[in-house]
Image (tube, grey):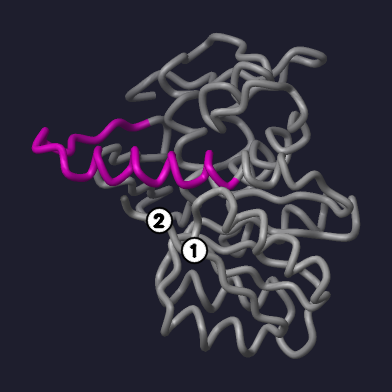
């Protein structure tokens, strides 16, 4: 049975070791490195299936590591941050991270989020292998190629992380319907609980920044709705 490889990038050996032990116990192949520069080099050689990446690192910081790794070979990235700052998280999402957790964190939740990231990658691969013609759908100046997992705005390519793309697709499948944060977590993140509602908010902000603020409406206290209809 294939065991996904996870690169753990964390400069605190105690935390790195604990993550590696837990992932190994869960059936993953896990390797820890302790600096940003080493992480970029090892990622090229190891070609991991996913990366758990601390933001604060010696040498290159986690944001630059994420940017370089994603430019070389896109993989799902779960970022770890010591600061519960929304702007920091948005910057992380902007350089290609798919999710984030604030320290201190639960190992159980880390494993659950990592599993969800890898499940979404598997779904994306299955869709890409589907022989159905790609097709495109347009909302205003935003064009979505679902099978090719490509998005453009005003004719220019827009880079979305796997999570952002899955969130966009789910929203466009329910145009005009207010979707609760809990429902989005369940169907996009594969989470059965509501512990990550702020994660949803951060990803919505990232989508608005990349695609324009007018496509997604906030229903205060409830969730979000995609407003544009195809062809508009």
Q: Most extreme residue toward the top, as rendered?
A: 177
What count of labels does the image hold? Answer: 2
Position of 122 relative to 89 (above/below): above
Q: Is residue 21 above or below residue 228?
A: below
Asked whether, in this view, residue 226 is left or right of residue 73, the answer is right
Element on which disc 2 rests: loop
Q: Position of residue 39 (x, y in %)?
A: 60, 81
| Dots 1, 2 in contact, CB < 8 A | yes
Residue at 51% across / 84% down in the picture?
42
- The correct choice, above or below, for 97 with respect to 67 in the image is above
Mark 1 nearby-residue class (10 Å; few <14, some 14–19, many ≥20)? some
Answer above or below: position of 43 versus 195: below
Residue beneath disc 2? 3
Range drawn in magenta: 114-138
Q: Residue at x 65, y 80 (%)?
A: 33
x, y percent for residue 155: 35, 53
Mark 2: give few (<14), some (14-19) or many (20+) Cα within 10 Å.
few
Q: Which residue lies under the disc numbered 1?
A: 29
Which secondary structure class fits the magenta region best? Answer: helix
Residue 201 bears which disc, if any? none
Residue 139 sits in quarter: top left
Identify which residue is drawn at 73% across, 34% down: 201
């Amino acid at each position: 049975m294939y065991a996904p490889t996870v690169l753990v990038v964390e400069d605190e050996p105690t935390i790195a070791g604990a993550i590696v032990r837990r992932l190994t116990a869960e059936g993953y192949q896990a390797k820890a490195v302790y600096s940003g520069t080493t992480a970029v080099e090892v990622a090229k050689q190891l070609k991991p299936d996913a990366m758990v990446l601390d933001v604060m690192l010696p040498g290159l910081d986690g944001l630059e590591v994420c940017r370089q790794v994603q430019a070389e070979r896109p993989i799902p990235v779960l970022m770890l941050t010591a600061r519960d700052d929304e702007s920091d998280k948005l910057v992380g999402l902007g350089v290609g991270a798919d999710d984030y957790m604030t320290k201190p964190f639960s190992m159980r939740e880390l494993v659950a989020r990592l599993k969800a990231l890898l499940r979404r990658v598997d779904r994306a691969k299955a869709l890409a292998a589907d022989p159905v013609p790609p097709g495109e759908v347009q909302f205003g100046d935003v064009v979505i190629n679902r099978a090719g997992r490509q998005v453009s705005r005003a004719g220019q390519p827009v880079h979305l992380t796997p999570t952002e793309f899955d969130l966009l697709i789910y929203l466009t499948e329910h145009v005009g319907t207010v979707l609760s944060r809990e429902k989005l977590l369940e169907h996009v993140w594969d989470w059965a609980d509501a512990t990550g509602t702020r994660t949803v908010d951060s990803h919505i902000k990232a989508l608005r920044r990349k695609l324009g603020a007018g496509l997604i409406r906030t229903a205060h206290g409830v969730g979000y709705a995609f407003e544009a209809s195809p062809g508009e």
